[in-house]
Structure formats: structure tokens, C-alpha cells
Image: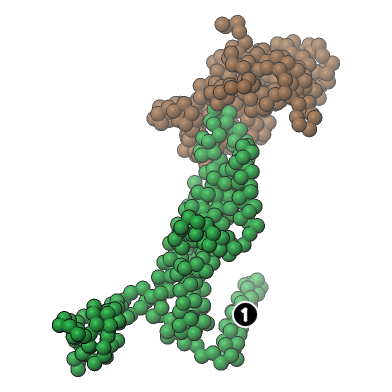
């Protein structure tokens, strides 16, 4: 009973601390006279403006008084055109527009720049993850191999990658390797992230393999299984199961690290945020939103991994 | 051909990199169908000798010939050799992520490339033979030590070996489970399996072995038929050892 009471008390303390934090942030922003404006944020997620309607040739614009029909009459020519399938006109009656000028926004929703950025972040992380796993598996097996070449090479790889900052590696991949091999920004991003994460996965897999009792290798070899068969059917299944939590942590790191590729010409979630801020000067709302979106991504992932762990623990 | 020993080790030496000499020139012959028990104090080299027979341990001198194959020669296909030599370990070493049945089936399907159905029916027969037909779909974690060791024996037998090596198979077991494992081994001996058993079970050695070997300090000190070995040992060291063990 007493314990119940004190637990309730500490939950109260927890709520108070959270409240104090929120009040602190609010107070600080009030001190710099920042007026919050969250109303702008949704349209960066889902843009209601829809597709852009562009002028096909140089022309004069005329819009009917009810605003429903927009007609074009070619400047210095005979062509004309009229549109009714738009939601909001951008040009005004009497305007002279040139080819590819914006006339109006068509009806319909399209993903805003933040969702486009989120999709890029997801794509980048997923593709990098696949290659990082392959690279990590190869290097991890190299670390525990008897072959001196495999051992040395994978050891050097891990040391080199873990000893240099990711940002520097991204610059090297983008500006040096990317230039030499003519890599696109996306490919360069995948290479940098996969090579970086692969080194950490290699260490996780090495420790997983080493955590499998030596007797497992001996038993399998005594049955006439060769090294590859033993690794594939006996050691790796056990090692991967043991390292699943660490691997999940590394995947989450990969998603977060992917924000560093925003230094390249690649509009991921972070870069999308920087682009928005440079046009609307609202860094507070945008960065908070972006943090929340990353949290959503990583939170979903760790939830999925926890479920997978539970399923594996059963058998 | 029947005269040629199945195992013929001559002058086997094992020196560890740290300088410890585990084996100092051991000669051992085991005939087909013979059951040999090796006893001795810990650190006497008996496990090292056993493990040298299927090259789980490298040697630094001498030669081991098993079934006409020089085990430690360059170019010997160890994987192929080991399919003829089953081994049972003190710590069972079952694969914990597989069921008992899958443990027994793994090597026949992957190494001998047996069709899964054939391997499965053979594995079921072997589990029945060690008295565990009802545990086929259970993971090792849910089996007692004695049951695990019996699965391990079935797993080794699945490769249809001509020799079985046992490395202290009952040393990690609770006393009440020793009997069930020894029973399986006795049946195996009765069927004519060639067996080398490193053990502390003197009762088993006396009842089942054709020959008992006493090892100490990296050498075979004494060997004889069990009757003479236990009742009238001609070695002072063995007397001392038996005195301590059988106390």
C-alpha cells in the first residue's frame, strides 16, 4: 500500500518535470519574442495547392468574372486556350504571361515537401541498410576468419570507418569518389551510409559470433560439416538472434545518420526542413516537426523489432 | 583386413604454444568392434588424445591413422573423415535453435545430401532407439541433461560412423541421469560399435570395455582387460588413482 502511494507520488514528479520543460521552452521562446505559427506547418506535409498549371506559350490572360474559366490568347500569334479544371488562379486578368509561367493551381492534394523528404529519407535508409547488412556480414565474418588477409582487411575497414567522422566520409564519398566514378547524389549517399553503418554492423556480428559457445563449432565440425555450412546453419542463426537488439539500434542510428547526407544535393527530411526555413523563416516549428517525424520513423522501427524479438524468443 | 586396427596412433605428441606438453608420445591401437575406456586424472591428456583421433586437436608429432587414413597428413579431407567418426561431448553441444529431430537431421541432409524424407525417417528411428521418440519436436532447452546427451548420441549416429568417440559423456550430468546415457552406450557396444570412451564411470568401464587404459602425465601408463585392470593393477600409480576414485 505504501509502495503504491510512493509510486503515485513519483508519477506526479514525472508529470511536473515534463510540464516544467514545456513551460521552459515556451518561456524561452517568449523571451525572444517568437510568435509561434503552427498553421503553416500542415501545408508542408500535404500541399493542397495541387499540380501547377503552366502557360504553354506566351499569351494574355483573361479570367471570367465568376473566376471559373481562364483563357489565353497568344501574344503575337493566333493560338488560344482555356482552362476550367483549376482550383485557384495565380495569374490575373490582363496579365501577359510567358511560356512556363504559373497560371493556376489545379485541384487535388499532393505530398508536401516534408513528406517528399521523409520518403527520400526512408528510401535512402532502406537501400543503405540492405548494403550495410551485406557489408557488415562479410566484414564480420572476416573478423573471425583464420585467413590473415580477410582478418586484416576487415579489421582495417572497421578501424578506418570508426575512426573518422561520418560527415567527413560523406564529403569524401561525394566530392572525391562521387566525382571520379560519376555517382549520383543518391548513390553517393547510399555508399557513404552503407560503408559507415557496415563497419558497426561488422563489429556487432563479430561479437554475436564470438558469443556462441565454442562447442557449437566443434560439434558441427565433428559431424563433418565444413566451415561455411557450420556458419550458415549453426553459428549465424544463433548469433543473429542474439544481436538483434544491437542491430535494431544500429538501424535506428542509420535513419538518424541519414540526416547528414542533407549536405549533398539530396532533399531528405532534414534538407527539406532547411529549404522551408530559408523561405518562411520559421525554424522553431519546422525543426520540432522534423524531430517528431524522425521519432515516428525510429519509434515504429523499434516497435517492429521488439515484436520480432518476441516472436523469435518463442521458438 | 579385419586384423588391421581401425585406429592406429603412433608416437602422438601434443605441445601447446605455451610449452605445456599434453601428449608425450602415445601409441594406441583399437580394433574393429573394440570398446576402449580411457581413464586418468584431469590434465593427463586423455581428452587431448581422443580429440586428436578426429583432428579436433592438431598434433605436434607422431601419426594417427583411422580407417586407413592418416588423419593429420596434409591434404586429408577432414570433413569426409569426420563423417566416419562420431563424437559426443561432455557439454552435449546440441544446436539450441533446432528441435531434437532437426539436430539429428542436419548433418545427413547438409553433408551427405540425403533427401529430407529419408533423413527424417532415419532420425526418428534413432531418436526412438535412444528412447526419445516423443521428444522429436522439442528444443534442447526443454530437455534434461540426460535427454540432451542421448539426442547428441543420436545426432552422431545419424552419420552412420564406424567409430564413436565419447569425451566424458556423463561428467556434466546430474547423478540420476548418468544411468540412462550409459544404458544407450551399452546397447551401442553390444551392437558391435567401435568405441573410445574417456570416462570417470568405473562401473561402465568394468562392465562394457574390452580394454581399459590409464593415462597420466601425457602417457599411457597401463592398459589391460577390465578384470585384471581393476582387480589386480600392476601399476603403483594406477593403484593410487583407483584408490582415490573408488573410495
Q: Residues within 10 Å of mark 1 (few under 14, many from 20)?
A: few
* Colour of chain A in the rendered structure image: green
Q: What residue is rendered at 54% in x and 59% in y?
A: A176
A154 up-or-down from B1: above or below: below
Residue closest to the far front: A76
Q: Position of residue A127 (x, y in %)?
A: 45, 57
Specify the chain shown as brown.
B
Q: Which residue is mark 1?
A: A17
Q: What residue is rendered at 58% in x and 21% in y?
A: B76
Q: What residue is rendered at 81% in x and 11% in y?
A: B234
- Tell me if A97 is positioned left or right of B144 in this view: left
- Tell me if A147 is positioned left or right of B108 in this view: right
B80 up-or-down from A116: above or below: above
Q: Position of residue A200 (x, y in %)?
A: 59, 54
Q: Position of residue B131 (x, y in %)?
A: 51, 28
Residue B247 visible within the image: no
Q: Give the quarter of the image for residue B14.
A: top right
Q: Quadrant of the N terminus of chain A?
A: bottom right
Q: What residue is rendered at 67% in x and 27% in y?
A: B57
Closer to us: B244 or B213: B213
Query: Does dot 1 land on a helix, a strand or a loop?
Result: helix
Residue B193 visible within the image: yes
B51 up-or-down from A7: above or below: above
Closer to us: B218 or B149: B218
Q: Give the quarter of the image for residue A103.
A: bottom left
Closer to us: A113 or B15: A113
Amino acid at each position: 500500500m505504501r509502495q503504491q502511494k510512493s509510486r503515485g507520488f513519483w508519477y506526479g514528479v514525472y508529470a511536473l518535470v515534463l510540464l516544467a520543460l514545456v513551460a521552459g521552452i515556451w518561456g524561452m521562446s517568449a523571451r525572444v519574442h517568437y510568435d509561434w505559427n503552427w498553421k503553416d506547418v500542415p501545408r508542408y506535409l500535404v500541399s493542397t495547392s495541387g499540380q501547377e498549371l503552366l502557360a504553354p506559350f506566351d499569351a494574355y490572360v483573361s479570367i471570367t468574372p465568376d473566376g471559373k474559366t481562364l483563357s489565353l490568347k497568344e501574344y503575337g500569334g493566333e493560338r488560344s486556350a482555356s482552362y476550367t479544371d483549376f482550383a485557384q488562379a495565380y495569374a490575373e486578368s490582363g496579365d501577359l504571361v510567358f511560356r512556363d509561367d504559373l497560371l493556376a493551381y489545379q485541384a487535388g492534394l499532393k505530398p508536401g515537401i516534408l513528406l517528399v523528404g521523409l520518403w527520400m529519407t526512408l528510401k535512402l535508409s532502406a537501400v543503405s541498410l540492405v548494403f550495410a547488412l551485406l557489408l557488415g556480414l562479410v566484414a564480420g565474418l572476416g573478423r573471425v576468419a583464420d585467413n590473415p588477409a580477410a582478418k586484416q582487411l576487415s579489421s582495417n575497414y572497421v578501424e578506418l570507418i570508426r575512426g573518422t567522422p561520418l560527415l567527413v566520409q560523406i564529403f569524401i564519398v561525394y566530392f572525391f569518389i562521387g566525382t571520379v566514378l560519376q555517382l549520383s547524389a543518391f548513390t553517393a549517399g547510399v555508399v557513404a551510409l552503407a560503408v559507415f553503418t557496415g563497419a558497426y554492423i561488422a563489429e556487432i556480428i563479430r561479437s554475436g559470433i564470438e558469443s556462441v559457445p565454442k562447442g557449437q563449432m566443434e560439434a558441427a565440425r565433428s559431424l563433418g560439416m565444413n566451415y561455411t555450412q557450420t556458419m550458415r546453419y549453426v553459428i549465424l542463426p544463433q548469433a543473429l538472434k542474439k544481436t538483434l537488439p544491437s542491430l535494431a539500434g544500429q538501424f535506428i542510428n542509420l535513419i538518424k545518420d541519414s540526416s547528414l547526407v542533407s549536405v549533398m544535393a539530396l532533399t531528405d527530411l532534414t534538407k527539406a526542413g532547411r529549404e522551408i526555413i530559408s523561405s518562411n523563416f520559421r525554424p522553431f516549428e519546422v525543426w520540432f516537426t522534423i524531430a517528431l517525424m524522425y521519432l515516428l520513423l525510429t519509434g515504429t522501427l523499434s516497435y517492429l523489432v521488439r515484436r520480432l524479438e518476441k516472436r523469435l524468443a518463442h521458438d | 583386413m579385419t586384423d588391421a586396427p581401425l585406429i592406429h596412433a603412433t608416437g602422438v605428441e601434443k605441445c601447446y604454444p605455451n610449452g605445456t606438453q599434453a601428449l608425450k608420445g602415445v601409441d594406441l591401437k583399437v580394433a574393429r568392434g573394440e570398446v576402449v575406456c580411457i581413464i586418468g586424472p584431469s590434465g593427463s591428456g586423455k581428452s587431448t588424445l581422443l580429440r586428436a583421433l578426429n583432428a579436433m586437436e592438431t598434433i605436434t608429432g607422431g601419426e594417427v591413422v583411422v580407417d586407413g587414413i592418416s588423419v593429420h597428413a596434409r591434404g586429408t579431407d577432414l570433413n569426409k573423415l569426420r563423417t566416419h567418426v562420431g563424437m559426443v561431448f561432455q557439454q552435449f553441444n546440441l544446436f539450441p535453435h533446432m528441435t531434437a529431430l532437426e539436430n539429428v537431421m542436419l548433418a545427413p541432409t547438409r553433408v551427405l545430401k540425403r533427401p529430407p524424407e529419408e533423413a527424417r525417417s532415419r532420425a526418428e528411428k534413432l531418436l526412438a532407439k535412444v528412447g526419445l521418440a516423443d521428444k522429436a519436436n522439442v528444443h534442447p532447452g526443454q530437455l534434461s541433461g540426460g535427454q540432451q546427451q542421448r539426442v547428441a548420441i543420436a545426432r552422431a549416429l545419424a552419420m552412420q560412423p564406424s567409430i564413436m568417440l565419447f569425451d566424458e559423456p556423463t561428467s556434466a550430468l546430474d547423478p540420476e541421469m548418468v544411468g540412462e546415457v550409459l544404458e544407450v552406450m551399452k546397447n551401442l557396444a553390444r551392437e558391435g560399435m567401435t568405441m573410445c570412451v574417456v570416462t570417470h564411470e568405473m562401473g561402465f568401464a568394468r562392465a562394457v570395455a574390452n580394454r581399459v587404459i590409464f593415462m597420466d602425465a601425457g602417457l599411457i601408463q597401463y592398459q589391460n582387460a577390465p578384470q585384471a585392470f581393476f582387480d589386480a593393477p600392476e601399476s603403483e600409480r594406477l593403484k593410487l588413482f583407483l584408490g582415490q576414485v573408488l573410495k
